[in-house]
Amino acid sequence: MLLSDVLTAYGIEADNVYMIQEDLVLERSGEFYLLRKAPESQEMREAQVMAAKGAERAGVLNVAQLQTTIAGADAAWVDGRYSWMFKFPEQSFRNAHVPLSEASDLAKVHENGRLNMSEHLSVGWRQWPVYWLHRLQQLERWYQQIQSQPGSSALDQQFMQTFPYYLGRTETAVQLIDECMKQSPDQAFNLTLTHKSYTIDTWRMVDTIRPPAKLPADFIFDHRTRDIGERLRSCCRTDTVKEGLNFLYSYHKQLPLTSVEGAAVTARLLFPLQFFEVVEDFYENETAEADEFYRQELQALWLDEQSYMRSLSEITKALAPHLRGSWFV
């Protein structure tokens, strides 16, 4: 059904098909395409297409091209869901270039992406604490609800025991980003092309000939510290501080960070994203069968917390050595 839908919508009959994480890659006569779930909201799709066009105009290298359907639509109903189709850029003598390091390439994206920011509305740092506090309020409601009801599951108990700690981390993150905006109010609006959730695996690689492709589906406009923070978050989670510091130094050499921006990255790392995601995933779609799985997820996060915060402290010394407090010992 899936390949039949692709053929009907895009006219692409693949010679080879395989998965990269949750994306479907199709190869046809040496050309590579990638199928990814698209937002059902037309407004969200248009916003990301606009960001992709901004990237192209800014000269960002190796951006995958969004393919329209045979009917001219930007997305198609494939295998029961809205999907986007992207074509990978081709490597040739005409567009060959000396590969940049990951950090240098990301810095180039941020540097070039700033050229088009006057065309887009966004709020950068100002949106972060608003969004964090909105999510926190929902967790507080669940916390109070569990407190007031008789009986609780093992997951409820795990959540109740750890929530006050993560509440403190969240409040500190909010205070820190608020302080960044007070110290450098203009910086809050210094926006550029970024990614929804940047990691070392965000750019897709299909073979050793083509460079990693940047997918328009990943682009949003925000402050560059969003990408840096999320890249370093994965290093804190995996206790690969040396990798994170090497990335940071390479990026800083290409596009230096101010001390206030360093503090903003630290604020982002302090926000306990994984804790929120696990709790939200369970309580928004609560099922008894999933209780033990999510309890183990919360327990694993808690057991790794000391390692995460130790890594965060080491990275903070490089990012914002002026920061002091119990979180950065």
Image (cartoon, rainbow, N blue to C red):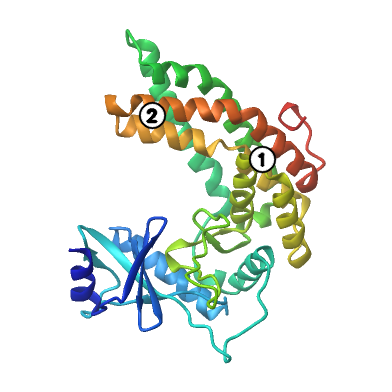
> Is residue 205 found left or right of 71 in the rendered image?
right
The label shown at residue 293 is 2
Percent x, y for residue 129? 55, 41
Percent x, y for residue 128? 54, 45
Circle 2: element type: helix
Image quadrant where one finds the N terminus: bottom left
> Is residue 84 found left or right of 249 in the rendered image?
left
Residue 323, placed above or below residue 120:
above
Disc 2 or 1, which lies upstream in sequence?
A: 1
Which one is in front, 55 or 279? 279
Q: Residue at x 58, y 70 (%)?
A: 113
Crowding around mark 2 (Cα neighbors within 10 Å: few <14, some 14 to 19, many 20+) is few
Percent x, y for residue 196? 49, 55
The extreme top residue here reads 150
Q: Residue at x 70, y 51 (%)?
A: 243
Amino acid on which the number 1 mark rests in the picture: Asp
Percent x, y for residue 210? 53, 77
The extreme right residue here reads 322
Image quadrant where one finds the C terminus: top right
Amino acid on which the number 2 mark rests in the picture: Phe
The label shown at residue 239 is 1
Residue 191, placed above or below residue 140:
below
Residues at marks 2 and 1, CA–CA distance in whole angstroms: 23 Å
Task: Name which quarter of the figure residue 70 lies in.
Answer: bottom left
Crowding around mark 1 (Cα neighbors within 10 Å: few <14, some 14 to 19, many 20+) is some
> Is residue 133 found left or right of 150 in the rendered image?
right
Which one is in front, 21 or 223? 21
Q: Residue at x 30, y 72 (%)?
A: 74
